[in-house]
Image (cartoon, rainbow, N blue to C red):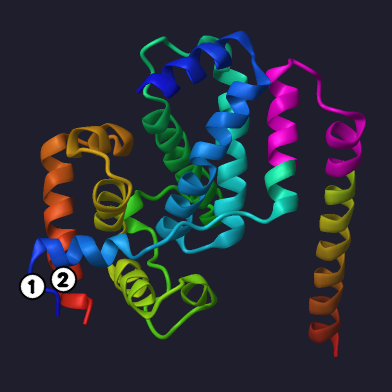
Amino acid sequence: MIDDDDSLDEALGALGTHDVDDWRREHVRLRAQAVLRGEPLGFYTRFVEPTLTAVVCVLHLAWAIARVAMLLVS
Amino acid sequence: MVAEGAWLEGLQRGDPAAFDAVYEAYRARVFSFVLRLGGERALAEDVMQDTFVRLAERAARLAPDTDLRAWLFTVARNRFLDRRRRMLFRGRTLSALPLAATTGPTPFDRLEQSELAARVQRALSALPADQREAVLLCSVEGFTPAEAASIAGVSPATLRKRLSRGRQALRKLIR
């Protein structure tokens, strides 16, 4: 058990820092830099990525509903 | 802080080098704070991204006396709560959020470099979320109680109470 504030501060000081992976670090930096320059988001970010995400979600939902329906029917 | 003043001026001009300097200085600290607050790596990555994109969006409009570090932590904290609320599908206060894992070492624990750090992390995870936030802001990140209160959106007295209770609980939990 830690009895005093100094020991507690020492223990909390033992916590290091964590960081994101290199790809994420660069991805965020480039995206923020584009925003800083006032550039509009690219075609991929505006249309392709959300469309793909929506398609995957709809397919997943349809699969889940079909599975539940099959279980109820059988 | 001299460097922060120069960074702020650079950001207001839209200087990419100033953004990079701020990003390098605070990225890991913001990410670590959110990771310890919520215990979820994917969420912390998203919040870190939101925070620095927000900085880029607001750079030109930052007040000359902005405390960049406090500004970033405030945005990160608010984005964390927004995302958690959305994930939970209903609004809850920070204190009502479920606790991070409290038993046994988690993958997150294993990221910590030392045994002591892992024990401290587990103890932090066991604290109520509002106390954990106060301890992280003041005792880990070095904010004053007044600064931390501003970030957390509570009065300094409330923050001090949470900090005191959190530190007291931590002392008992870290064995």
- Residue at which label 1 appears: A3
Residue at the spot 13% in from the left edge and 62% down from the top edge: A6
Q: Which residue is mark 2?
A: B171
**Classed neighbour count for the residue bearing mark 1: other residues with Cα under 10 Å, few (<14), some (14–19), many (≥20):** few
Toward the bottom, the furthest residue is A74
Q: Are marks 2 and 1 on the same chain?
A: no
Q: Which residues are magenta?
A: A27-50
Who is closer to the viewer here, B97 or B13?
B13
x, y percent for residue B110? 50, 77
> Where residue B94 appears, x then y in whole percent?
35, 51
Q: Are marks 2 and 1 in contact (CB under 8 Å)?
A: yes
Q: How many marks?
A: 2
Using the image, name the chain to which the residue with label 1 belongs. A
The mark closer to the camera, 2 or 1, is 1
With respect to residue B106, does A5 lie above or below? above
Does the segment drawn in magenta span residue A42? yes
Residue type at numbered disc 2: Arg
Q: Circle 2 sits in a helix, a strand or a loop, which is it? A: helix
Furthest-left residue in this view? A4
**x%, y% of residue A54?**
84, 49
Q: Reply above or below: B84 against B120.
A: above
